[in-house]
Image (cartoon, grey):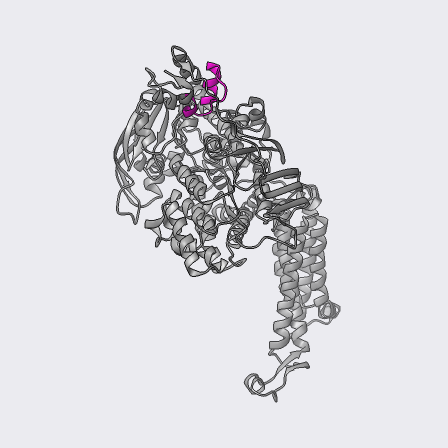
């Protein structure tokens, strides 16, 4: 179906090629995962499949890409659109129609198909992605997962034989990601669509794919069936990619073969070994004499008069030194809660106190009380260099030069930005931009740091370096995230929201052991927890936990 | 914090003005735009503005949108009247207030005196009312027409599809742009920055470019402009009442334009007929 021969490509204005001498053959009906660290060239390779490169890209392209035996170079974009459908990362940026059926009909209309045929294709595509019953609804009313499924349907309506997906689940909550992956797998298995997916969240997609291609520095490093590729787990983990828990368990326990499912991992572990008897130290919910930094009392807020409540009679206390992860579905009210703590929105009903000061319509917070890292860090970077970006808040605080210099140096060093101080922030890589935004916030030493889904679209290495930097610099932290591993690793407490209310607040290990709660709030248990459950162990949430509990 | 979500909410779906065929709304807006050039009577211009405002209220738009319309009207009217009142240059002109006397030290000789002119106020009022009426009607059409129907309406009125698509898509992304602007301002404020500065444009523009790139890839991947023409899933059909409304409005405007044109022909000595005197009188006093 797809043949790539000696393909190299260099973007205009770049000195080095983004992909180099790629040779690849993908058979019809395969489900291939294309992965690797940020900047390895995987998205560039994907754009070569549907002709975006070289037809619309400029740059220098050598070698050839054949789709169904025909070179992409010799086909027009219209011809290619009927062969390869490309779905991109952000559903909001690629959906432009206001009604669902219009979005799907756009492609067939462009191909001048007769109306009955357009009607037929719209119906089929929406049914295939399980949106058949809402074709006349507004696209704005869809959840993140539904929007991404709509983007897939819009491509399916062109009847392509290949679906190219560029990080389609990176901006979705676990439930949305699962919906999308289930639909993609169905398209692959039931409809025979060849799928090529770029994704660095290997742990979420590995169970679905037949074959894994791992790239590094523009070249293919591993190309093998998934299980075989996972046998090189050390190499993959070394690139900063997150392995599925079952693979990590296989690696740590040196199992005879790589386990791809919970049942396989549990089955292999059951063949021998005993459990350590010590019990994990229980962390207390609130320490004696704890000093509250945030106190939210009976907070309610709605955006428009006719909208439902975004937060509904919400109560929360965050103590100094706590790291609280706020979790739940998209639209659960997490960001609205953060906006209130940051005093960006005054309470409609109820009260919010931060560092002992009540927030009202007429009274905000003194500068430097709250620091906030937004979901899209690019919107926080408006200075000409990293140095000026980090120094911006410190200057506005009016600190003495010596204090300013000390805080600046500490923030820059803890986030590994020392070599980049004179670079323009927006010219940096994704992970570096995120760290710059974090450094600019923590340098001001706020009483509390808020993070609004900072892990979205970031690979494990970036997430870990950001969170480590934050843990070293910020005393009290409240962060919204869909990333279960990050929450378990960094949070001292998890607050679960649903429909604007807090439905649970407890230690991470207690929250992630409650399957009913997780299902209700759109979260999923970790694979390690499921393996532990199969083995009859409680309190297993990560491969490290399992390793610690296991006595060989 | 500005509630941007209220901006994206139409709130007008249940009203008659929302259900009107988009072509009727677009054509009436264009006809009014041409007609308004011929009008000089401030009362009639004010009446057109009142019609626009009545439409805004009848459409039950959100409070934020009503506030935006009122702010645009106030700023437009004040700006036009203020500038024309002070800097009106046609003759005759009657000074009704002296702002800077020619005898004032330094400023007097420098400006030659600054006055508020009666004719300038009236002229500014005409210009301001023209602008306010058209802005109100334009916003009313945009906010009571689903963007897909606006696109279809423009295409059916023979606007090239690419052009119509670009215009409508740009409008569709305005709320997202607004949301991002608010986020940049919030991020800047939390670090002690001003509410808005030129620097805050940098991330907004950067994100716009990135989004434009994503959108371009999305549409090109779906055979955009693959052929000279395209087919459509949905069709627009005028109903009898809409046809009647459009024809009636067109007739009314045509009659007013003919009256005004006859009067101008008479005024400049191009054409005169005694039987048309009532028409000249009507155009002179009312239009």
Task: Please state the horizontal and vertical placement of residue A63, each as a whole percent of the image.
Answer: 25, 36
Residue furthest out toward the bottom: B103
If the image is split into quadrants, where does the C terminus of chain A sit?
Answer: top left
Answer whether residue A535 is magenta in the image: yes
Task: Please state the horizontal and vertical placement of residue A532, each as a whole percent of the image.
Answer: 46, 18
If the image is split into quadrants, where does the N terminus of chain A sit?
Answer: top left
Q: Is residue B156 above or below residue A190?
A: below
- Residue B94: name its quadrant: bottom right
Task: Please state the horizontal and vertical placement of residue B3, each as a whole percent of the image.
Answer: 61, 48
Q: Is residue A239 above or below residue A268?
A: below
Answer whether residue B33 is magenta in the image: no
Q: Is residue B269 visible to the viewer in this orientation of the structure?
A: no
| Residue visible at 70% across and 68% down in the picture | B41
Residue furthest out toward the front: A288
Residue furthest out toward the right: B278
| Residue visible at 57% across and 55% down in the picture | A366
Report whether B106 appears left or right of A215.
Answer: right
Q: Is residue A317 visible to the viewer in this orientation of the structure?
A: yes
Q: Is residue B85 above or below residue A125?
A: below
Between B157 and A29, the one nearer to me in the picture: A29
Between A2 and B134, the one nearer to me in the picture: A2
Residue interval drawn in magenta: A528-546
Secondary structure, magenta segment, majority class: helix
Report whether A58 appears left or right of A281.
Answer: left
């Amino acid at each position: 179906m797809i043949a790539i021969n000696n393909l190299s490509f260099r973007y205009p204005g770049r000195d080095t090629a983004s992909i180099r001498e790629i040779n690849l053959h993908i058979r019809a009906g395969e489900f291939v995962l294309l992965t690797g660290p940020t900047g390895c060239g995987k998205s560039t390779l994907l754009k070569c499949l549907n002709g975006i490169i070289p037809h619309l890209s400029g740059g220098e392209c050598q070698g050839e890409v054949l789709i169904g035996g025909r070179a992409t170079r010799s086909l027009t974009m219209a011809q290619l659109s009927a062969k390869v459908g490309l779905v991109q990362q952000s559903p909001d940026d690629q959906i432009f129609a206001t009604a669902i059926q219009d979005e799907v009909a756009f492609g067939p209309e462009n191909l001048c198909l007769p109306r009955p045929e357009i009607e037929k294709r719209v119906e089929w595509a929406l049914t295939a992605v399980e949106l058949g019953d809402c074709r006349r609804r507004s696209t704005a009313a869809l959840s993140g997962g539904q929007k991404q499924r709509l983007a897939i349907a819009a491509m399916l309506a062109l009847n392509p034989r290949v679906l190219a997906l560029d990080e389609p689940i990176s901006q979705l909550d676990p439930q949305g990601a699962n919906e999308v992956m289930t639909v993609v797998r169905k398209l692959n298995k039931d409809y025979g669509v060849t799928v090529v997916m770029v994704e660095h969240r290997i742990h979420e997609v590995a169970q679905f794919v037949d074959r894994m291609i791992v790239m590094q520095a523009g070249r293919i490093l591993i190309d093998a069936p998934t299980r075989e590729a996972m046998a090189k787990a050390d190499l993959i983990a070394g690139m900063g990619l997150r392995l599925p828990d079952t693979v990590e368990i296989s690696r740590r326990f040196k199992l005879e073969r790589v386990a791809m499912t919970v049942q396989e991992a549990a089955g292999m572990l059951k063949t021998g070994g005993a459990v350590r008897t010590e019990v994990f130290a229980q962390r207390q919910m609130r320490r004696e004499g704890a000093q509250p930094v945030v106190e939210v009392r009976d907070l309610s807020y709605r955006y428009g008069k006719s909208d439902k409540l975004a937060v509904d009679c919400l109560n929360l206390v965050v103590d100094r030194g706590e790291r609280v992860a706020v979790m739940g579905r998209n639209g659960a009210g997490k960001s609205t809660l953060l906006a209130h703590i940051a005093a960006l929105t005054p309470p409609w009903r109820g009260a919010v106190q931060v560092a002992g000061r009540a927030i009202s319509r007429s009274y905000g917070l003194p500068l430097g009380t709250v620091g906030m890292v937004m979901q899209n860090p690019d919107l926080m970077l408006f200075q000409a260099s990293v140095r000026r970006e980090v120094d911006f808040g410190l200057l506005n605080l009016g600190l003495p030069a010596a204090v300013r210099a000390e805080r600046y140096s500490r923030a820059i060093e803890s986030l590994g930005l020392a070599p980049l101080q004179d670079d323009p922030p927006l010219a940096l890589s994704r992970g570096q931009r995120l760290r710059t935004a974090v450094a600019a916030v923590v340098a001001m030493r706020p009483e509390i740091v808020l993070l609004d889904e900072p892990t979205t679209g970031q690979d494990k290495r970036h997430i870990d370096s950001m969170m480590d930097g934050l843990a070293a610099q910020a005393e009290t932290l409240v962060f919204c995230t869909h990333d279960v591993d990050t929450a378990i690793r960094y949070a001292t407490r998890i607050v679960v929201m649903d429909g604007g209310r807090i439905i649970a607040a407890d230690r991470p290990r207690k929250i992630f052991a409650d399957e009913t709660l997780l299902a209700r709030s759109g979260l999923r248990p970790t694979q390690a927890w499921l393996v532990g459950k199969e083995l009859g162990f409680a309190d297993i949430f990560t491969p490290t936990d399992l390793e610690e509990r296991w006595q060989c | 914090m500005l509630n941007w979500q209220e901006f994206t909410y139409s709130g007008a779906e249940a009203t008659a003005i929302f259900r009107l065929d988009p072509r009727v709304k677009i054509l009436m807006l264009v006809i009014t735009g041409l007609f308004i050039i011929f009008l000089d009577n401030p009362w009639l211009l004010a009446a057109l503005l009142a019609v626009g405002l009545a439409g805004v209220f009848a459409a039950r738009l959100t409070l934020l949108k009503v506030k935006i319309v009122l702010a645009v009207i106030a700023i437009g009217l004040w700006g036009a009247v203020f500038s024309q009142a002070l800097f009106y240059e046609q003759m005759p002109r009657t000074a009704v207030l002296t702002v800077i006397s020619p005898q004032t030290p330094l400023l007097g000789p420098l400006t030659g005196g600054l006055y508020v002119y009666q004719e300038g106020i009236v002229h500014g009022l005409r210009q301001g009312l023209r602008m306010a009426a058209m802005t109100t009607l334009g916003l009313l059409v945009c906010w009571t027409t689903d963007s897909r129907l606006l696109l279809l309406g423009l295409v059916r009125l023979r606007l090239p599809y690419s052009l119509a698509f670009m215009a409508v898509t740009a409008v569709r992304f305005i709320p997202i742009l607004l949301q991002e602007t608010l986020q940049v301002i919030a991020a800047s404020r939390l670090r002690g920055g001003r509410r808005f500065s030129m620097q805050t444009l940098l991330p907004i523009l950067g994100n716009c470019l990135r989004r434009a790139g994503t959108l371009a890839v999305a549409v090109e991947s779906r055979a955009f402009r693959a052929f000279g023409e395209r087919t459509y899933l949905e069709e627009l059909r005028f109903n009898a009442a809409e046809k009647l409304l459009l024809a009636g409005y067109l007739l009314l405007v045509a009659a007013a334009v003919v009256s005004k044109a006859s009067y101008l022909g008479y005024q400049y000595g191009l054409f005169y007929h005694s039987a048309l005197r009532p028409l000249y009188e009507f155009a002179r006093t009312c239009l």
